[in-house]
Amino acid sequence: MGKTRFESTIKQIPYPQQAVYDMLSNLENISKVMDRIPEDKISDMEFDRDHVSMTVDPVGFIKLAVCDREEPKCIKFQTEQSPVPFYVWIQMLPVTDTTSKMKVTAEADLNPFIKAMVQKPLQEGVEQIAEGLARIQYN
């Protein structure tokens, strides 16, 4: 088993770092972007300030919890329930007073067999999350 890291490309966000952090650090704000979540991939979503759970096709049921907040630059999540335990963190950095940039990273302990099966879907998933977060209106 070895740690495998999946990183999104860096996304430019036309909003200040603090606005992005404020929205993403409270998972209750997912309600504002429910219309952007692909229903064919994600269902049964429930959330509160610190937790989100969903059924992800083809992975299964996943529950994540915020495990660390570093205002205004990083939010870390860990799985509470998942077929494969993993961590996810969202990093935000200022570019100007009115813009910022973001990267999403996931890390999991994967044996070579599991890694071969999940590497492509996990990389694509991290990139899709980053793209979705880049399109949110943070005001």
Image (cartoon, rainbow, N blue to C red):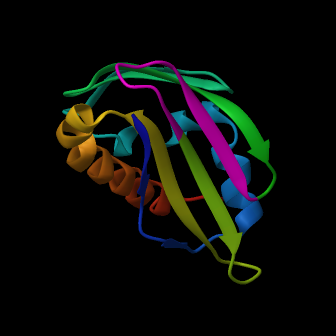
Task: Name the side, left or right, on which 103 lies relative to 65.
Answer: left
- 88, above or below 27, in the image: below
The residue nearer to you, when weighing 87 against 55, is: 87
What percent of the width, then of the height, locates residue 43?
Answer: 30, 23
Give coordinates of residue 59: x percent, y percent: 25, 26
Q: Nearer the viewer, residue 135 or 110?
A: 110
Q: In front: 64, or 110?
A: 110
Task: Please say whether residue 26 is one of the residues in the magenta stretch.
Answer: no
User: In this rendering, is residue 121 above or below 81?
Assistant: below
| 73 in relation to 29, above or below | below
Can residue 39 be seen in this snapshot? no
Which quadrant holds residue 138?
A: bottom right
Q: Quadrant of the N terminus?
A: top left
Corner quadrant of residue 111: top left
Q: Position of residue 39 (x, y in %)?
A: 25, 32
The residue positioned 58% from the left and 74% from the top of the image is 14
- The span shown in magenta is 73-87
Toward the right, the furthest residue is 71
Residue depicted at x 59% and y 52%: 90
Q: Is residue 84 part of the magenta span, yes or no?
A: yes
Q: Residue furthest bottom?
A: 96
Residue pictured at 72% horizontal, 66% vertical? 17
Horizontal arrangement in the rendering, residue 126 relative to residue 30 (left or right):
left
Q: Quadrant of residue 9?
A: bottom left
Identify the residue shown where x is 76% and y is 42%. Answer: 69
Instruction: State the residue lying farthest toward the front.
Output: 1
Q: Quadrant of the C terminus?
A: bottom right
Asked if residue 71 shows in the view, the reply is yes
Q: Using the image, determine if residue 132 lies above or below residue 52.
A: below
Q: Whole-percent x and y of residue 10?
A: 48, 71
